[in-house]
């Protein structure tokens, strides 16, 4: 009893330590909320835009630094939007076109913002991925429930009879779900049994959201990125035992998804829509002025109009948008914008691939982001990804990790290397 009475209170933590921890928690929460909001874009401007404008402004006032490693991303994106202004100059009446370019510039800045914060603190990657998974599960649930009309008013989460979740377009909803799906698959292949088991139901929900979106692009994107993830994890495995584990889990996962697909196709309405959407070439693709014919017309116009024809004009003239990001860059952002966009994509793909297999704390995130980014670049040949918020998030995350690797190598060269995974 006397010993208890003689106990002295533990010394209080220094105020600076408490403040630093509080700031760290606020940063983590602010970033997590921003990524979470990216999964809910039913109306525009969406809460994501309004929130990110404020977040970027506040971060810029206190702690946002654009390093020389991120500067090329900022430069190329600004020049890309300058190309949009050049193309806009070809129009006699602007209407809402300046707002369109302003949105393009805003999304570009979100990409630079995420690149900068990842470079400054790689621990935020975990927060970003967790928030993206939560957003994907939530919006996928809304899409699935909406597709089956599970509650009054559920139809607001569908478009054209297809699941759209909290998005305006099923063709954006499906691709948004791809990175969380690939990340969960990566965890199932590599993580401890408990974490892998928890990831399974989340992956099934997200895969269900992709399926019921009935987006051919999203189906192909998920299939290809999943196979690439298994391949990269297999190649990255260090022992034969690990490779055998990856192989067995991949086979079981494929069998499970195939079984789920067969069960879903027992529902007549699902089977009919699946049969219709599964055709590689739809009527609106191969018609006289279908998607493929418009590609030819558009690229011919691009050779005749180096300054572009004006943002959004292609759709007004031919009745449908370009559905091709390269053609859109040429016509809506001029040759200048196209050159910058092409340079940016090639630079990103090359720099990301060079560091893909280097063992770093952020390597799992890098593998997932790189694979999904490659899929989105390929998808851009048949759909317009110009204003996809999550595409710019992918781009920013990738550049942030490229910058992390450059910083790591510079510290190693100068002998000032910090422990990997430490806060930067």
Image (cartoon, rainbow, N blue to C red):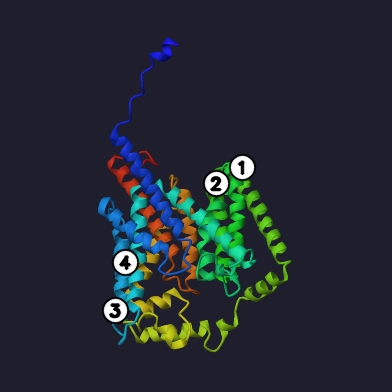
Identify the residue under disc 3. 86
Is residue 66 visible from the viewing direction of this image?
no
Neighbour class for label 3 at 10 Å: few (<14), some, many (≥20)?
Answer: many
**Cα separation between marks 3 and 4:** 15 Å
Identify the residue under disc 1. 241
Neighbour class for label 4 at 10 Å: few (<14), some, many (≥20)?
Answer: some
Q: Is residue 237 left or right of residue 13?
A: right
Q: Residue farthest to the top?
A: 2
In depth, the one of 95 and 381 nearer the eye is: 95
User: Regarding mark 1 in the picture, which secondary structure is present there?
Assistant: helix
- At 36% from the left and 48% from the top, the residue drawn is 27
In depth, the one of 363 and 315 nearer the eye is: 315
| The image quarter in which residue 100 lies | bottom left
**Cα separation between marks 2 and 1:** 9 Å
- At 34% from the left and 46% from the top, the residue drawn is 408
- Quadrant, the C terminus: top left
Identify the residue under disc 2. 237
**Residue 177 position in % (x across, y down):** 53, 61
**Cα separation between marks 3 and 2:** 49 Å
Q: Nearer the viewer, mark 3 or mark 4?
A: 3
**Cα separation between marks 1 and 4:** 45 Å
Q: Please determine whether, in this image, residue 354 is positioned above or below residue 238.
A: below
* Lower sequence index among marks 3 and 4: 4
Identify the residue under disc 4. 76
* Lower sequence index among marks 3 and 2: 3
- Quadrant, the N terminus: top left
**Residue 303 position in % (x across, y down):** 37, 84
* Lower sequence index among marks 1 and 4: 4
| The image quarter in which residue 353 lies | bottom left
Is residue 183 visible from the viewing direction of this image?
yes
**Cα separation between marks 3 and 1:** 57 Å
């Amino acid at each position: 009893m006397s010993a208890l009475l003689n106990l002295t209170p533990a010394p209080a933590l220094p105020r600076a330590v408490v403040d630093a921890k509080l700031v760290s928690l606020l940063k983590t929460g602010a970033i997590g909320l921003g990524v979470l909001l990216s999964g809910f874009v039913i109306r525009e401007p969406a809460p994501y835009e309004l929130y990110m404008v404020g977040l970027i402004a506040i971060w810029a006032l206190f702690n946002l630094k654009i390093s020389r490693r991120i500067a090329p991303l900022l430069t190329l994106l600004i020049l890309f939007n300058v190309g949009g202004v050049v193309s806009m100059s070809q129009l006699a009446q602007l209407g809402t076109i300046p707002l369109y370019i302003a949105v393009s510039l805003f999304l570009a800045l979100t990409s630079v913002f995420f690149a900068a914060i990842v470079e400054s603190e790689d621990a935020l990657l975990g927060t970003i991925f967790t928030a993206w998974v939560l957003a994907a599960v939530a919006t996928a649930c809304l899409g699935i429930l909406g597709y089956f009309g599970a509650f009054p008013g559920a139809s607001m989460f569908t478009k054209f009879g297809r699941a759209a979740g909290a998005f305006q377009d099923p063709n954006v909803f499906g691709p948004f779900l791809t990175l969380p799906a690939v990340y969960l698959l990566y965890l199932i292949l590599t993580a401890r049994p408990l974490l892998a088991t928890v990831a399974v139901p989340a992956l099934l929900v997200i895969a269900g959201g992709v399926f019921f979106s009935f987006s051919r692009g999203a189906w192909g994107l998920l299939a290809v990125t999943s196979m690439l993830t298994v391949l990269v994890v297999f190649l990255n495995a260090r022992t034969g035992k690990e490779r055998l584990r990856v192989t067995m889990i991949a086979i079981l996962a494929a069998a499970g998804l195939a079984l789920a697909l067969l069960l879903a196709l027992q529902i007549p309405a699902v089977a009919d829509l699946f049969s219709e959407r599964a055709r590689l070439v739809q009527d609106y693709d191969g018609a006289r002025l279908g998607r493929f014919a418009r590609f030819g017309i558009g690229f011919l116009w691009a050779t005749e109009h180096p300054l572009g024809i004006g943002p959004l004009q292609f759709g007004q003239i031919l009745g449908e948008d370009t559905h091709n990001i390269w053609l859109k860059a040429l016509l809506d952002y001029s040759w200048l914008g196209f050159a910058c966009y092409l340079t940016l994509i090639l630079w990103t793909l090359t720099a990301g691939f060079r560091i893909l297999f280097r063992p770093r704390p952020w390597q799992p995130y890098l593998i997932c982001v790189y694979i999904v980014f490659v899929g989105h670049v390929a998808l851009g040949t048949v759909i317009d990804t110009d204003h996809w918020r999550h595409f710019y998030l992918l781009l920013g995350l990738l550049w942030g990790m490229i910058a992390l690797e450059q910083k790591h190598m510079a510290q190693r060269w100068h002998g000032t290397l910090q422990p990997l995974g430490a806060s930067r």
